[in-house]
Amino acid sequence: MPSPAAENPIDLSCLPSVDEMLGEEMTVSMISELGRDRVVAMVRGLIGEKRDAILSGRENLPKGPAVRQAITNELTEKLGAARSTELVAGVRRVINATGVVIHTNLGRAPLSERAVRAMVDAAGYASIEYDLEKGSRGARGPKAVSLLKLLTGAEDVLAVNNCAAAALLVLSVFAKEREVIVSRGELVEIGGDFRIPDILTHSGAVLREVGTTNRTHLRDYEKALSARTAMILKVHPSNFRITGFTKTPGTAELAELAHRNDVLFYEDAGSGAMLDLGSFGIKDEPVIRNLIADGADLVSFSGDKLLGGPQSGIIAGRSELIQRLRRDPFYRALRLDKTITAALEATLEAYALESAGQEVPVLRMLAVSEDEVAARSGRFIEKLRGVLKKNADLQAELNQSQSAVGGGASPDSVIGTTVIELTHSQLTDTELERRLRKSVKTPVITRIEAGKVLIDLRTVAESEENEIVDALEIIASG
Ligand SMILES: *Cc1c(COP(=O)(O)O)cnc(C)c1O
């Protein structure tokens, strides 16, 4: 018996060939924009999808003499849409109007002008590992090391790709196949898949949990100590808080206990606060210098959270321990790139010059007072109303709200702010949010609260305000 397909064969000769599609006018200009191989792959993909849709019966074959032309037109239109997507793909500058200062999805800390200049300067050949005095090979990024030693008070410092890499390196070098004592209240997951138990497992260390979720006493650590113990680890719970009936020993107590028992004390501080940021509304964020002074052997923290620099993970501590980390082959796989090293050095230089509060964007944004944001928002809304004139579809009002620190800072750390609330009589909140995000020139990222699209100028540079006004004008004019 013939199969149904053989009985009623589907004629695929109506599909254009790849070569025919490449001859279309639009495809020719696409090749100059995107390159031949990419366009060929896109065309193949679209023809393949069409073939599958027809063969599976999901789509009926159009009838009539001009079938082939109709399909070619349809595929060309789809290719046009794919072209628009492709032309704006990749990492692009965006305007962060969310009010979340350290926004992990938007690249955390925006760099200072000094750091950007240093990065560009280092992009060509650069003295990353070359001693210009001696004219021979030198240490890698020694300036960042000496500035960090000065700022943290540590004997020595090592910088790697991020704080997760820092933790992995420390644990694998000092605790492989040995026990690491951690409080149950600190076995946390921090945004972006960083989970303390997983990091311990991957480093080859053995997790020894002590205490309970809400309370862990010094004696719990003490009882867990044995000949198998390599270190006591304290983890800053970052964006997670247990409140109420809680207890956990401090750095000084744990360091003292560790040293009395000849084991190491390592603290993963997460966010690298160089200064006390309490006056900015940032709650219980440890200052790295204090942890070192309290006796921590090793402390790790991110370079792109409260420090306000490029993505990096910094390990500060006792010199013989840091030297062992530096000599370990694993470090070679985690070390910083030259442009990142240059940006880190420039960020740290601002701290050394005591101008970080004005220069480092994260600190500057956190320091902006509620009154200042309110005044800027008032001026912004006047500008916007002037541009919108009599167009009543888009409405903008001021309201009180809160900015967030983000980047693993305590959820209790909130900063009062003023937001511009947008509503559109013809568009839903999600559609208005989408249109701002898809703005042709620069995507504007906002947040939605109670049916309104909010713009928080705390995280928007003054030079970006006009871009937002322009984007809203385009949306308002349909
Ligand atoms: C954020 C954080 C990390 C991870 O840091 P990355 O730089 O993102 O790798 C690790 N530990 C703590 C406590 C953190 O807050």
Image (cartoon, rainbow, N blue to C red):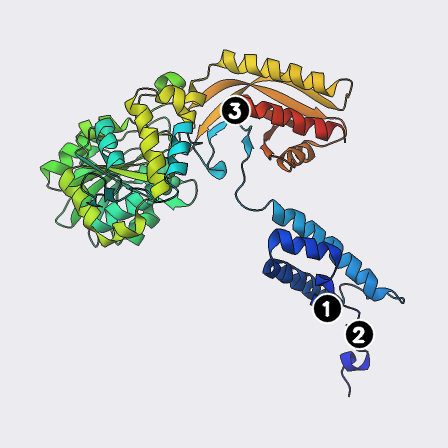
Q: Amino acid at mark 1?
A: Ser
Find the distance from the CA under tag 1 to the CA under tag 2: 14 Å
Q: Given contact means CB atoms under 8 Å apart, are the residues at marks 1 and 3 in contact?
A: no
When asked about the image quadrant of residue 287, the answer is top left
Q: Are marks 1 and 2 in contact (CB under 8 Å)?
A: no
In primary-sequence order, the first of circles 3 and 2 is 2
Q: Position of residue 193 (x, y in %)?
A: 42, 45
Instruction: Indicate the position of residue 117 as horizontal and vertical percent values.
Output: 40, 32
Tag 2 residue: 11
| Element marked by disc 2 | loop
Spot occupied by residue 74 in the image (x, y as percentages of width and height): 78, 57
Which mark, residue 158? none
When the figure is inspected, residue 88 is found, relative to residue 472, above or below; the finding is below
Instruction: Evaluate if marks 3 and 2 touch, with contact meaning CB atoms under 8 Å apart.
Output: no
Q: Residue 461: give its label.
A: 3
Q: Position of residue 278 (x, y in %)?
A: 35, 19
Quarter of the image with the C terminus in it: top right
Mark 2: amino acid: Asp
Query: Could you give the CA–CA distance between mark 3 and mark 2, rounded to whole angstroms?
Result: 58 Å
Quadrant housing the N terminus: bottom right
Q: Nearer the viewer, mark 3 or mark 2?
A: 3
Q: Secondary structure at mark 3?
A: loop
Query: Amino acid under label 3?
Result: Ala
Query: Is the CB atom of the residue marked by disc 3 within 8 angstroms of ligand 1's nearest atom?
Result: no
The residue where tag 1 is placed is 17
Nearer to the camera, 218 or 460: 460
Q: Residues within 10 Å of mark 1 (few under 14, many from 20)?
A: few
Residue at 29% x, 49% y: name it: 200
Q: What residue is drawn where x is 15% and y is 39%?
A: 319
Q: Is residue 455 left or right of residue 247?
A: right
370 with respect to 155 (left or right): right
